[in-house]
Image (cartoon, rainbow, N blue to C red):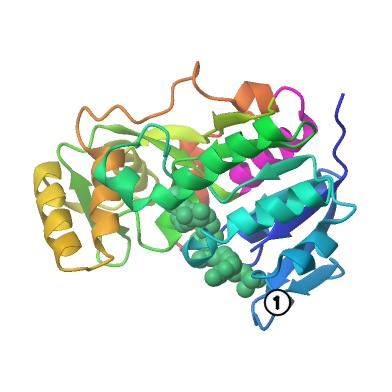
Amino acid sequence: MVSIKTVAVLGGTGNLGPAIVTELVSAGFSVTGVTREGSTNSTPKYPDGLPVQRVDFGSFDALKTVFDGQDAVVSVVGFPGLAGQKLAIDAAIAAGVKRFIPSEFGVNTQKARGTTIGNLLAVKIGVTDYLAEKAEANPGFTWTALTTGHFFDWALENGYYGIDLKAKTAVIVDAGNEKAHSSNLAQIGRSVAGILKHPDETANKYLGTASFNAAQNEVIALVEELAGIKLTVESVKSADLHKTGQEKLAAGDPRAFSDFLKEFAFAEGKGNAISEEESANALVGVPYESLRDTVTAWLKKAGLI
Ligand SMILES: NC(=O)c1ccc[n+]([C@@H]2O[C@H](COP(=O)([O-])OP(=O)(O)OC[C@H]3O[C@@H](n4cnc5c(N)ncnc54)[C@H](OP(=O)(O)O)[C@@H]3O)[C@@H](O)[C@H]2O)c1
């Protein structure tokens, strides 16, 4: 039976990383932050007292030295760092790391294989394929990848969910009734900790966890009920999102990703919610959350209730 106690976190300073670091620390893991040489992110973002190593992410030797003595490596690097994870995986194997969790999260790239959004996320698919190959060839080395759907509370707060509380407007896709796979940041952190607490059951698997599946109309109805306001709702057709996404792609505009993401998550009949049978919440010991409580917390923070 594998036991994981020490965990190195790469890129723990971004949108998602701090929630993962916080939940790993509170689950009792001994966490080291690994940040790029020259990065200015780490000081305010890592919790006080957390050991932080500054490393050249392009150096196998430097990464191996940092990974020596670590049971697991969790990568939360942002998009520009995704391809570099292969070198980190090689260094982790050489250092005797038992589990590598890549920067996957978000969209289920296994379901998206062969689609336009899957092609835009090909680097993530390449990394999970690489991990599977390496685990096959290196007994003792294992991996787990985690899909989480939308970063729900983060998207609400940062305006990516399409609800503008100040303007009292919302934008939905099609009829707004498609259930979308959604996870709050802390829930993702708890899921990563849960994976490392259950290393045998989660070895060499592509898993998904969630806070809940939520339709845009459900979220809008909760906002209206809880805050006592009426939102003006505009609908965009998923077919139009697909078309504008293709146009942006052809023009080399990276904002195409957002159109395809909305189509993947919210287009009527897409079926990309995560069912209870598919989800690993029970496997990693992380209960679902309440959509109502999440929306309530957001509205409280916004001073509306
Ligand atoms: N589903 C969603 O709604 C959603 C939303 C956003 C992100 N995601 C996914 O979640 C993961 C993390 O995203 P994030 O938004 O938290 O990332 P992020 O904030 O953009 O970046 C995270 C960290 O990566 C490190 N980093 C930046 N450039 C790097 C490079 N070239 N090489 C290596 N490391 C680099 C930085 O850490 P240091 O400066 O400390 O080195 C940075 O703080 C990604 O896989 C992303 O695709 C999903």
Using the image, determine if residue 183 lies above or below residue 166. above
- Please report the residue visible at 64 percent of the width from the left and 58 percent of the height from the top: 87
Question: Is residue 241 shown left or right of residue 67?
Answer: left
Q: Residue furthest front?
A: 137
- Please report the residue visible at 80 percent of the width from the left and 71 percent of the height from the top: 53
The residue nearer to you, when weighing 33 against 114, is 114
Using the image, determine if residue 210 lies above or below residue 125. above
Residue 269 locus on image (x, y percent):
21, 27
The residue nearer to you, when weighing 292 against 242, is 242
**What kind of residue is marked 1?**
Pro
Residue 111 locus on image (x, y percent):
37, 31
Question: Is residue 55 shown left or right of residue 250?
Answer: right
Task: Determine if the magenta segment contains residue 192.
Answer: yes
Can I make out residue 151 in this image? no
Magenta span: helix, strand or loop, mainly? helix
SS for dot 1 = helix
The quarter of the picture showing ligand 1: bottom right
Asked whether mark 1 and ligand 1 are closer than 8 Å, the reply comes as: no
The residue nearer to you, when weighing 220 against 152, is 152
Can I make out residue 232 in this image? yes
Q: In which quadrant of the rendered view does residue 48 lie? A: bottom right
Q: Magenta residues, as a range? A: 186-201
Residue 162 locus on image (x, y percent):
29, 55
Q: In which quadrant of the rendered view does residue 68 lie? A: bottom right
Residue underneath mark 1: 44
Task: Determine if the magenta segment contains residue 70.
Answer: no
Q: Residues within 10 Å of mark 1 (few under 14, many from 20)?
A: few
Q: What is the quadrant of the N terminus in the image? A: top right
